[in-house]
Every structure is written in C-alpha cells, then in structure tokens.
Image (tube, helix red, strand yellow):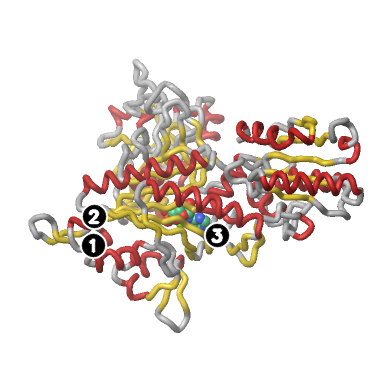
C-alpha cells in the first residue's frame, strides 16, 4: 500500500480527551476515530488489525468444532422478554423507538431461539456455535476509547450439551482455545476464577490483562497464579497477637478525637492497638463491624457474608443506635450483631469507642468483654501481603477483562423451552455455556502492552503491515527507482508492505510516522547508502522493537528480512 494515497490521518499531538495509552496511540496513528461517545470508526489501517484478530479467533474456534453464525443485531423484543432480560439489562439495552425491537447486547436469546427449533435429540449434541458480531450496550460511562464502547465487536460462542459432564468438556475446549488465541496475539494475561483462584475453579473464568485502563481491581500472585477480584480476594496477614495479660477496661475522656489517627496521637498508642468501628444497616438492622487499626471494610465481602445488600448507617441513625457519633462508637454496650475482622481474632488490650461522644474505652478483651462476637475475613487485600496459596507476595492492580467463559447451565433452555429427548425418550433442557471475547479490547491490550514513547510496537502476527518501506527523498530518481523495485520484490516475496512514497514529506516526519505506526521492520532507502556499495547499493533496516539498525546489500534484503522476521515478536 502506498502511503501517498492511503487514508492514515496521523496526529502529532495527544488528543485532549484521551488518557489511556492505547486510546491515545490508536487516535494518533490513525487507526480509529470517534464518531460519538463510545462510538468509533475503524479506519483502513485499524481495520486490518481487527481482521487479523478475528481470523486468529476464527481459526481457534473452528479448531474446537465451532460453527460460525452471523446473527442479527436488531432483535424482536419479544424473544428477550422470554428470559426476562429486557428488564435485567435495563438502561444498558438500546431500544428502537416506536417499534418492538432492541439492539442485541449479547446473543444468548437468539442462539437459544435457533437451538430450540433444531436440537431435538441427544444425537444432535454437542454443538458449539459462535459469531463475531457487533454488540450494543448503552454503557453509562464509555471510556478508554474502544475498551469500553457503546458499540463493539464480540466473538460470542455458545455450547449446547446433554448434561453437565458433556458441558464441562465444551467449557474446557473453550478454555484451551482462549489460551491459544491470547498466546497467538502475544498478550500477557492471567485467569481469574481458575482452579488456583479464590472461586475454586467454579463455572466461570475471566481472562484479564493488567492495565491502568482497567476497571476491575484484582489480586494476583506471579508465582502460583492465584488471581482474584479484590471483592473476594484474601491474603495471608498476621493478626493482632493476644497478649499474655489483659488489662482492665477503663473509660478515657478523649475530647474531639474522631479518627483512629487522632486517637493514636492523643493516647500515644499504635493503630494496631485500636479496633475501628463501622455501623452498617443490613435488612433494616444495625451490624457493627470492627477492623484492626485504620483498615477499611470490604463491603463486597460483607454483603457476601450477610447474603444481602448493606449500607453504611447515616449519622442520625448512628446517634440513635449507639448514642454516639461515628468517631466514638465501639463494641462495649453495642446493641446488635457484631462482626470483627479475622485480624482481631481473640485480641485483648484494645482501644475502641465508648458509644458516648468524646469517650473511648481502653483494655478491651474481645474474649472477656464482648459476648457474641463473630469473626470473618472482611479486609481489602493490598500489594505486598502474602499469597493465600503459596509463600509469595500478592500484587494488587487494575485490569481489563478480555474474555469470559461461563457455564450457563439450563437457565436459558428452561425459560425458552429448548428441550431435547434423551436416550430413554425423556425430555430435558439443553445444558449451555457462553463464551465472549472483546475483539477491540484484544487490539487495545496489545497496544497497552507494546508501545514506547514514540508509538506502537506491533507484533508480527497483528501488525497491519509486515514492512514499512521508507523512500527518503522521493524526488531523487535513484531513490524512486530502488524503492519501487524493493516494494515490488518484497510483495512478491509475500510481505505486506506499507510504502512511504510521499514526495512532499521530510525524512524526519517519515521516521516519526514509521515509529508511531509501529510495523515490525522498517526499510529505509536513501541516496547515500545506495551509492555505498559496488554491487548495487545498500539500504538501512531498522527493527522497531529493539531499535536495532543495520545496513543490508540490496541483493540480500529479502533473505535478511525473512531471517530477521522469524525472530521478531
Ligand atoms: P465488563 O465487566 O468489562 O463490562 P462484561 O462482563 O460486561 O465486561 P461480557 O458480557 O462477559 O462482558 O462480554 C464479553 C466480552 O466482551 C468481555 O470480556 C469484553 O472483552 C467485551 N466487552 C464487554 N463490554 C464491552 C464494551 N462496552 N466495549 C468493548 N468490549 C466489551
Ligand atoms: Mg459490562
């Protein structure tokens, strides 16, 4: 492709609204343009990458027996009403005004609709059906470019099996296909919910990538692979040891002391001697949560423990329930359920609020002084804490979900009546799985993981072109002649070549564009080098990832690029 006539509108400046590296670089290198909030066009260069990713996904899905469909994005609402998901999706689902249609945010309903009409006998199974199609979701906060769009491409697959055991096989096939897909795209990923994870290899795995653009916070152990969302992650941390002697409780006047920090300062104590109190309302009743020192309550863990939503008590409620304001609440005399974090297990000689404004109590012994005290893991894990599964330390960071595999069971087949006859003629619901990959997210994550201050560094598998050929001074006949010949020879040898044949652009700009666009190999054709050799001239080759540069005789160019391309990633 000739750059002089190819629509690649590169930008020198960083666009204002873009903060994430992949978003900035996709705009700057002319891969995408925004049309509306969360709505993007892929320009020709960007679309080449989308097609390459789709092809890798297609090959791996076909390899596990997947059959490709193309389903409509415009769906009759009545099909979605069968599963109650018009309501479940709420505002996230786009509705067509004055018509009973919706724009599909996913395709479980439509696939089940097809399945129920054809998969009638146990002999019809297993089936793996997939598609690579546009999805519509009215995301409340579209951000980070194509990472969270309102219209995006998803590979979605659905499996239909006769029982759980067979479904496990389909699920495992997807698990291995996903690993192959992401490995081929050279993405560094980890799996949350896998067998080493907190969810114990349950019916769902998320394939995640570490990224500042991520909206999930996860705890990960590099050593054993333990990965879990912080909402459920646990860690190995020491508790407050029980001291040999328990002091007597005593009330202490602590005027204007509201926080743990203020308490520590006032009493000249360490925060590990304090039990922080938080009151939550659960099903209309107060629950007191006690944390060691200044630690925060992990509300997701609390909700999981209590089995229902909780909310922090309002200031007026707190006064009514405890007789004190937030800064003076404690377990002694608290009327209601009390749960302490595991780090406070059987602790003594603690300081906490007295349930009386401007007073605290010291010398609290949980075993002696708090009658019905429950313990649970209610912490938010932090970087550097011990991995719960091995001797190593956890890292806590934000991550993007690239893909998700999920055992659906019979939820959709039962509500939509997708039934088959088993060997004994008994009617049973199909057992289903669903499996998604965000195609644009794969592309954005590759860029997140492969760029430098100058631009994108494409791996050869996803690079829009294999070689970026730069004719330095395209007004010079020698350069034109040599670069035209190289362009032809490289293409004949099977390389996709982007040829910077622009006559009115200076060398510096051409170099900058080549680094920004990020093809793995650059071939630079200049007058000086062409004249350097008696045997027909030399050109310069630059490898984008390493920055390595070397001169090559024209006659050896193809073999040299072939040799180098083998090792490029
Ligand atoms: P998230 O938690 O990031 O919103 P999700 O759980 O809603 O993701 P799924 O419904 O499992 O995602 O969709 C399957 C895949 O589609 C995701 O793993 C992700 O890669 C991609 N995806 C989901 N929502 C978007 C979006 N708004 N823009 C781009 N890709 C998306
Ligand atoms: Mg979502």
**Of 520 and 565, the residue lying toward us:** 565
- The residue at label 1 has a CB less than 8 Å from ligand 1: no
| Residue 296 on image: x %, y % | 46, 39
Q: Secondary structure at mark 2?
A: loop
CA–CA distance in space, label 3 to label 2 = 35 Å
- Residue corresponding to mark 1: 119
Quadrant containing the N terminus is: bottom right
Check if mark 3's residue and mark 1's residue have beta carbons within 8 Å.
no
**Mark nearer the N terminus (3 vs 2):** 2
| Residue 257 on image: x %, y % | 53, 38
Specify few, some or many for label 2: CA neighbours under 10 Å numbering under 14, 14-19, or 20 or more: some
Query: Which label sits in the foreground, 3 or 2?
Result: 2
**Of 501 and 513, the residue lying toward us:** 501
Is residue 175 toward the left or the right of residue 429 in the image?
A: right
| Residue 215 on image: x %, y % | 52, 48
Query: At 40% across and 54% down in the image, what residue appears?
Result: 317
Q: Secondary structure at mark 3?
A: loop
Check if mark 1's residue and mark 2's residue have beta carbons within 8 Å.
yes
- Residue corresponding to mark 2: 125
Is residue 165 toward the left or the right of residue 66 in the image?
A: left
Q: Residue furthest left?
A: 424
- On residue 19, the disc is none
**Of 261 and 268, the residue lying toward us:** 261
**Mark nearer the N terminus (3 vs 1):** 1
Quadrant containing the C terminus is: top right
Residue 309 vertical position relative to residue 40 in the rendered view, above or below = above
- Residue corresponding to mark 3: 149
Query: At 36% across and 53% down in the image, what residue appears?
Result: 66
Residue 393 vertical position relative to residue 325 in the rendered view, above or below = above
């Amino acid at each position: 492709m000739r750059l002089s006539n190819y629509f690649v509108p590169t930008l020198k400046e960083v666009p204002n609204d873009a903060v994430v590296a992949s978003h900035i670089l996709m705009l700057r290198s002319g891969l995408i343009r925004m049309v509306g909030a969360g709505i993007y066009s892929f320009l020709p260069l960007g679309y080449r990458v989308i097609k390459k990713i789709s092809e890798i996904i297609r090959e791996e899905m076909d390899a596990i027996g997947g059959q490709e469909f193309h389903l409509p994005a415009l769906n009759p609402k009545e099909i979605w009403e069968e599963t109650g998901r018009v309501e479940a999706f709420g505002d996230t689902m786009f509705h067509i005004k004055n018509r009973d249609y919706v724009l599909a945010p996913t395709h479980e309903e439509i696939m089940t609709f097809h399945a129920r009409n054809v998969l009638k006998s146990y002999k019809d199974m297993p089936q793996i059906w997939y598609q690579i199609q546009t999805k519509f979701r009215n995301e409340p906060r579209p951000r980070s470019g194509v990472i969270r769009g309102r219209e995006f491409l998803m590979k979605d697959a659905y499996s239909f099996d006769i029982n759980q055991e067979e479904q496990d096989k389909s699920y495992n096939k997807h698990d291995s296909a996903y690993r192959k897909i992401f490995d081929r795209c050279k993405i560094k990923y980890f799996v949350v919910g896998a067998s080493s994870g907190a969810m114990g290899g349950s019916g769902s795995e998320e394939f995640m990538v570490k990224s500042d653009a991520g909206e999930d916070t996860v705890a990960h152990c590099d050593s054993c692979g333990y990965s879990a969302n912080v909402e459920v992650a646990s860690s190995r941390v020491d508790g407050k040891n029980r001291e040999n002697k328990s002091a007597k409780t005593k009330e202490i006047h602590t005027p204007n002391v509201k926080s743990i920090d203020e308490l520590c300062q006032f009493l000249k104590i360490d925060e590990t001697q304090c039990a922080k109190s938080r009151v939550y309302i659960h099903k209309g009743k107060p629950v007191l949560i006690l944390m060691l020192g200044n630690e925060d309550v992990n509300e997701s863990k609390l909700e999981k423990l209590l089995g229902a939503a909780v909310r922090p008590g309002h200031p007026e409620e707190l006064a009514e329930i405890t007789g004190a304001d937030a800064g003076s609440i404690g377990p002694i005399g608290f009327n209601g359920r009390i749960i302490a974090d595991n780090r406070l297990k059987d602790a003594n000689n603690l300081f906490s609020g007295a349930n009386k404004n401007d007073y605290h109590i010291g010398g609290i012994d949980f075993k002696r002084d708090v009658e019905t005290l429950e313990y649970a893991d209610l912490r938010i894990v932090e970087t550097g804490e011990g991995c719960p599964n091995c001797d190593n330390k956890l890292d806590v960071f934000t991550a993007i979900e690239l893909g998700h595999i999920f055992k659906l069971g019979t939820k959709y087949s039962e509500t939509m009546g997708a039934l088959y006859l088993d060997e004994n003629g008994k009617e049973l619901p199909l057992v289903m799985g669903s499996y998604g990959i965000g195609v644009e997210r794969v592309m954005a994550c590759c860029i997140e993981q492969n760029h430098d201050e100058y631009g994108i560094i494409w791996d050869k598998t996803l690079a829009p072109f294999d070689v970026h050929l730069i004719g330095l001074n395209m007004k010079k006949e020698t350069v034109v002649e040599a670069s035209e010949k190289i362009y032809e020879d490289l293409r004949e040898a099977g390389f996709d070549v982007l040829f910077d044949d622009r006559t009115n652009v200076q060398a510096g700009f051409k170099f900058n564009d080549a680094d920004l666009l990020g093809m793995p190999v650059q071939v630079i054709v200049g007058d000086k080098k062409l004249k350097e050799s008696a045997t027909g001239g030399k050109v310069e080759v630059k490898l984008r990832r390493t920055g390595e540069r070397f001169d090559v005789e024209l006659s050896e160019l193809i073999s040299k690029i072939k040799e180098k391309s083998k090792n490029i990633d």
